[in-house]
Image (cartoon, grey):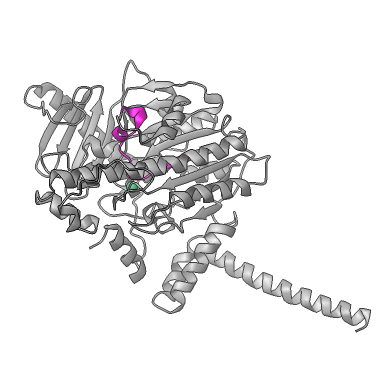
């Protein structure tokens, strides 16, 4: 072969490669541009291509997603601060050492708390995943955006944390382990790297993968002139409750009811029928703690690796739970989450480690996780978008002397709202117009309903709820979350496995 033939052959191959690259890139851009994923999903839904398409798209989204998707950098970052948001699904505050739990389940998080501001009375906006994360990512109460009993698509008009940070110059990546905080509901907006391949259902242990993928993303941030934002979502404490060999808390006595039920829905039915014996309930608690300890270990590995890479000290690290879990401790025999607004469900852990571990300490005043977004933006000196448009709501500026009321609600299995103000907590079941009142500083388990003794407090707290509802209504300004496209049979099956659809 002559040199020129060789050269022609080379160019022909280069053109062929270029053509293929253009075709692939065009396909990817089409597939990844604003929302055609659903349209494409519809096109191939039900076909043999579906599974392959989803696998490929999962891989693309996880590994190669370009920033042209939803992340458009508009400014140079004004702050060099890396921001790491670590969330654990279904994590009660009172099952952690730094919140006073007697079992040693969380040595790594306890160590993080020693470098952080600890918000000892943090309240989630809602007792289940999607609306709880809507609160964290938008700074708005989910009720203000039309979220009620079903998981809905985050309205595209509402700014979200990752998008704000991305536009402000941050490199962004998210690793999640549940579809309720995934692409299907719009939570990937603003992330230029995204991985939700670990949304594997109830019995899938994923914490190791979340830590590994988080580190992979951190190492992929090669533009060291720009800070990064990482969101890492862990899921293992969520049911099913599995005991981890290396973190055993049980005494080996098996509950008789557990052998009858092999998934959470059956356990919930047994619990509500009063058929879970004490040993079974204890076994659930022991396994739940084992899952927490396993997750804590994996978060410890992530933090150790941050330290090794020299990224711990000067990063802002936010740690939180999205909601808690009822563990059959109440007379109603509730198990699981979503259905109530008791402390077991809405009281979540919240730690904020500032760069250089400035401002270590504890805050007992009730605060809301909807204030996480304005807090992060306050810490980096960036203005918060409406409705949290000022630094007033920043948790770095909480006035202990005049606590603000904090709200949460659920629309699953009823209509329940709650407000915490100072030491008081009012729960209002709006479907039956009944209120309960507790002093949570003395009675965190909400055993002693004081509504009859303190009618004036009840009417004051009820008026706070009325005002809050007016505010929610006023702040909606026509924005309402809408349903995502219909589930495919495979997605329906996956959610059934998670216990979310019948
Ligand atoms: Zn959750």
The residue positioned 12% from the left and 45% from the top of the image is 431
In front here: 173 or 207? 207
The residue positioned 49% from the left and 71% from the top of the image is 53
Q: Is residue 455 left or right of residue 51?
A: left
Q: Position of residue 153 (x, y in %)?
A: 37, 55
Q: Is residue 471 left or right of residue 265?
A: right
Res. 377 visible in picture: yes
Task: Tell me: residue 283, above or below residue 30.
Answer: above
Q: Position of residue 335 (x, y in %)?
A: 20, 47
Residue found at the far left of this picture: 452
Task: Tell me: residue 116, above or below residue 415.
Answer: above
Location of the N terminus by quadrant is bottom right
The residue positioned 27% from the left and 34% from the top of the image is 407
Q: Which region is colored magenta?
A: 85-100
Res. 476 visible in picture: no
Q: Is residue 89 left or right of residue 433?
A: right
Q: Position of residue 33 (x, y in %)?
A: 54, 61
User: Residue 248 is drawn in which quadrant?
Assistant: top left
Question: Is residue 455 highlighted in magenta?
Answer: no
The residue positioned 16% from the left and 27% from the top of the image is 438
In front here: 61 or 94? 94
In front here: 250 or 267? 250
């Amino acid at each position: 072969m002559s040199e020129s033939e060789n050269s022609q052959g080379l160019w022909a191959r280069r053109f062929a490669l270029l053509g293929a690259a253009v075709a692939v890139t065009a396909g990817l851009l089409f597939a990844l541009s604003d929302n055609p994923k659903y349209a494409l999903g519809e096109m191939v839904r039900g076909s043999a291509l579906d599974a392959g398409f989803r696998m490929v798209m999962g891989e693309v989204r996880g590994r190669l997603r370009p920033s042209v998707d939803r992340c458009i950098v508009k400014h140079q970052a004004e702050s060099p601060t890396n921001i790491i948001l670590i969330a654990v699904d279904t994590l009660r505050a009172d099952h952690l050492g730094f919140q006073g739990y007697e079992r040693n389940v969380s040595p790594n998080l306890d160590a993080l708390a020693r470098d952080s501001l600890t918000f000892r009375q943090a309240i989630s906006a809602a007792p289940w995943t999607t609306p709880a994360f809507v609160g964290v990512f938008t700074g708005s109460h989910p009720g203000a955006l039309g979220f009620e009993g079903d998981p809905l698509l985050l309205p595209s008009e509402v700014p979200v944390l990752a998008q704000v940070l991305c536009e402000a110059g941050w490199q962004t990546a998210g690793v999640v382990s549940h579809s309720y905080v995934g692409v299907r509901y719009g939570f990937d907006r603003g992330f230029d790297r995204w991985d939700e391949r670990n949304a594997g259902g109830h019995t899938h242990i994923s914490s190791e993968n979340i830590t590994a993928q988080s580190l992979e993303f951190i190492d992929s941030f090669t533009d060291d002139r720009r800070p990064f934002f990482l969101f890492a979502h862990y899921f293992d404490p969520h049911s099913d409750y599995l005991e981890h060999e290396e973190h055993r808390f049980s005494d080996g006595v098996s509950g008789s009811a557990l052998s009858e039920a092999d998934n959470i829905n059956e356990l919930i039915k047994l619990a509500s029928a009063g058929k879970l014996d004490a040993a079974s309930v204890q076994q659930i608690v022991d396994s739940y703690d084992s899952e927490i300890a396993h997750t804590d270990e994996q978060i410890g590995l992530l933090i150790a690796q941050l330290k090794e890479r020299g990224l711990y000290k000067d990063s802002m690290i936010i740690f939180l739970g999205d909601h808690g879990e009822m563990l059959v401790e109440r007379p109603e025999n509730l198990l699981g989450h979503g259905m109530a607004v008791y402390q077991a469900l809405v009281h979540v852990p919240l730690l904020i480690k500032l760069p250089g571990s400035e401002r270590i300490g504890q805050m007992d005043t009730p605060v809301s996780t909807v204030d996480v977004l304005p807090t992060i933006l306050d810490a980096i000196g960036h203005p918060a978008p409406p409705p949290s448009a000022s630094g007033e709501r920043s948790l770095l500026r909480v006035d202990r002397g005049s606590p603000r009321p904090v709200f949460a609600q659920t629309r699953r299995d009823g209509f329940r709202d709650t407000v915490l103000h100072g030491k008081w907590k009012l729960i209002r079941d709006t479907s039956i117009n009944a209120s309960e009142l507790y002093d949570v500083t003395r009675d965190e388990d909400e055993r002693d309903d004081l509504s009859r003794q303190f009618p004036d407090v009840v009417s004051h707290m009820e008026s706070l709820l009325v005002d809050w509802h007016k505010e929610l209504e006023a702040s909606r300004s026509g924005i309402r979350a809408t349903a995502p496209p219909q589930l495919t049979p495979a997605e329906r099956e996956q959610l059934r496995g998670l216990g979310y659809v019948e």
